[in-house]
Image: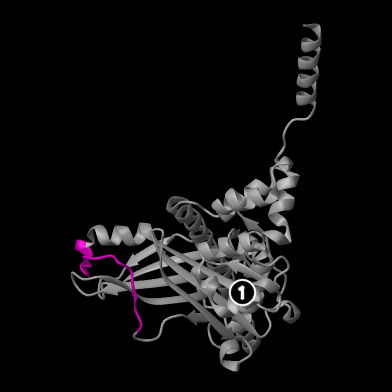
Amino acid sequence: MDALQSEDSSSSSNSSASPATISTVHPDILRSHILNRLDGATLAALASTSPDLRSLISSSSSSDLWRNICAATWPSVAHPDLASLIPTFKHGHRSFFSDSFPAVHHHRRLSTPNPDLEIAGRIISAVDIYYGDSPIFSKVAETDTTTEWFNTAPFRIELLEAKEVVSTGIRDYSSGRGKDGAWLKSLEEELRVSWIVIDPAGKRSANVSSGVAVSVRHHWLTGEVQLKFSTVVAAAEGVEEVELGVVVTCGGEEGGEVHVREIYLGMEDMEGRSLSGRGSLGILRGATEGERRRRRGTRVEGKAEYERFLERKREWKRRVERREKVLDTLCLVTGVAFFLTFFAFLLM
C-alpha cells in the first residue's frame, strides 16, 4: 500500500514538474489542423502569445500559410505580376501582409521631400472591392512614375476605362434624392475597398484605403453616388497633412442594378489642392515605410476619424485666412504710408 502511494506521489510530482506546452504538439499538426483555419489578424496576434508559436508562424516553412492568407484576404494577389513579386519581399507573403493589412499611422511626419527617398520607376496598385464578404472586383494596375505627364499632372490613378462598369448586385436603383431607400444604405454599409500601393523597388506596400466609406455624397442632378475611402497621412513641414482618397462612383438605370462607374486614387493637401505626381512620390514612400496601427473596424469609427480631419482642415484654412488678412493690412498700411510720404514730399 505504501509502495503504491509512493508511486502515485512520484507520478504526480513528475506530472506537475513537466506540464504540457505548445512545443509538445508537432508543428505539422499545428500548421495543418489549427493555424490554417485562422485569418491573418488572428494569426499575427497568436504569434505574440508564445515564443514557440512566434517561431513557428514566422518560419520559412509557414510561407504557404501566409500565401493562402493573402490570397483569401485580397484576390488581386493572385495576379501573375504579384505572384512573382511578393516572394521577393524580406519575409515574402508574411511581410506583405504585415505591411498591407494594418492602417497607415498618419502621425509620422515626413521631412522635406528627398528624391532619393521617393518611389523609383513604377507604382503597382492592387485593388479589391467587396460587397459584404464577397469580392466583386479585383485589378492590378501599374503606373510609370518616370514620364513627364505623371510628374507634372495632378496625381490620379484611374482603374476603369471610359465605358467600363462593375456590377454590385444591389438592385432597385433610384436616382431621385427623395427616393434613396434601401439600396443607398446598403451601398454605404456593405461596400468595402482595399487599395494596396506597392513599391517594387523598395519591396514595401501600404493599404491607403480606409476600408469602409468615410464620406457619401448623392449628386442631386445626375443621381450618382460618390463614396470616399480616405486615409490621412502626415506630410512635409508646411503642408501639415495629406489626404489619400480612394473614390468610388456608383450609378445605374432607374429601378435596375447599381453599378460602379469610376474608381480612382487621388491626393490632396489641406487646402484641397491636388498634388502633382512628382509631389506624391515622397508621400507614398513615407506611407509604405511608416508606422502602422490597428485598422478601424466600423464605419462609425472611420467616419469619426475623418470628421476630425475635416475639422483640422477647416482650422488650417482659418489660420491661412488670418495670415492673409494680416498681410493685406500690412500692405495697405505700407501703401498709405508711402502715399502720404510721397505727397508730403511734393508739398515741400
In the rendered image, the quadrant that contains the N terminus is: top right
Q: Residue furthest bottom?
A: 148
Colouring scheme applied when the structure was drawn: one colour
The amino acid on which the numbered mark 1 sits, given as a three-letter code, is: Ile
Q: Nearer the viewer, residue 8 or 292?
A: 8
Estimate the x, y position of residue 110 in percent, counting from the top left. 69, 68
Magenta segment main secondary structure: loop
Disc 1 crowd rating (10 Å Cα; few below 14, some 14-19, many 20+) is many
Relative side of 70 to 290, left or right: left
In the image, residue 178 lies in the stretch drawn in magenta: yes
Determine whether the residue tagged by mark 1 lies in a helix, strand or loop: strand
Q: Residue furthest top?
A: 1
Disc 1: which residue:
198
Q: Residue at x 26, y 72 (%)?
A: 223
Estimate the x, y position of residue 120 in percent, counting from the top left. 69, 83
Estimate the x, y position of residue 330 in percent, counting from the top left. 60, 73
Q: Residue at x 26, y 76 (%)?
A: 222
Q: Residue at x 58, y 73 (%)?
A: 197
Q: Residue at x 54, y 51 (%)?
A: 37
Q: Quadrant of residue 186?
A: bottom left
Tell me if residue 79 comes above or below residue 50 in the rendering: below
Q: Nearer the viewer, residue 138 or 297?
A: 138
In the image, residue 33 lies in the stretch drawn in magenta: no
Q: Is residue 221 visible?
A: yes
Tell me where the magenta segment starts and ends, as one range.
164-179
Estimate the x, y position of residue 277 in percent, counting from the top left. 58, 83
Q: Quadrant of residue 182?
A: bottom left
